[in-house]
Image (spheres, grey):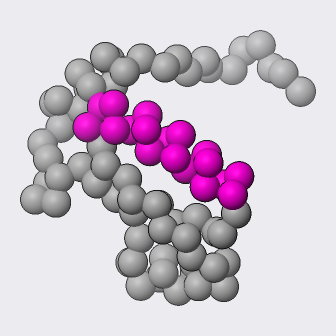
Amino acid sequence: AFKPGLAEFGYNVSRAAQLLSDVPKSAAGRHFTCLVRPDAEIERIALIVKRQLQQVGIGMSIEEVPVDQQSAAVKGGRF
């Protein structure tokens, strides 16, 4: 149920870009891989997040990985 005292989060691309400008880029830049299970709805959500992150200079690759292989990918640092 809705709790009126919870913090609210807004969508402010300019503020996000400003905050990120103070953070030094690593050698690989600002990029990561998002592992998703093979599911059209999950992939659509990942694409929305990817577009939002692109607006502030963060790259995101989307990789479909079967559920049984996700744990191994995370344990092996392949994400």
Residue 71 image position (x, y, % from top left): 58, 81
In the image, what residue occupies the spot 30% across and 31% down?
Answer: 56
> Picture quarter containing residue 58?
top left
In the image, what residue occupies the spot 69% across and 57% down?
Answer: 40
Q: Residue furthest right?
A: 1
Q: Nearer the viewer, residue 54 or 2?
A: 54
52 is higher (above) or lower (below) than 58? above
Residue 22 image position (x, y, % from top left): 16, 30
Side of 17 where 66 appears, left or right? right
13 is higher (above) or lower (below) than 58? above
Side of 40 where 33 appears, left or right? left
In the image, what residue occupies the spot 57% across and 76% down?
Answer: 65
Q: Main secondary structure of the magenta part?
A: helix
What segment carries the magenta color? 40-57
In the image, what residue occupies the spot 41% across and 70% down?
Answer: 79
Q: Nearer the viewer, residue 10 or 5?
A: 10
- Asked if residue 14 is among those painted magenta in the image, a careful observer would answer no
- Asked if residue 49 is among those painted magenta in the image, a careful observer would answer yes
Q: Residue furthest front?
A: 40
> Picture quarter containing residue 31?
bottom left
Q: Nearer the viewer, residue 26 or 53?
A: 53
Residue 10 image position (x, y, % from top left): 52, 17
Disc tally is 0
Residue 49 image position (x, y, % from top left): 50, 41
Side of 69 where 78 appears, left or right? left
Side of 22 where 70 appears, left or right? right
Point out the image quarter for the N terminus: top right
48 is higher (above) or lower (below) than 79? above
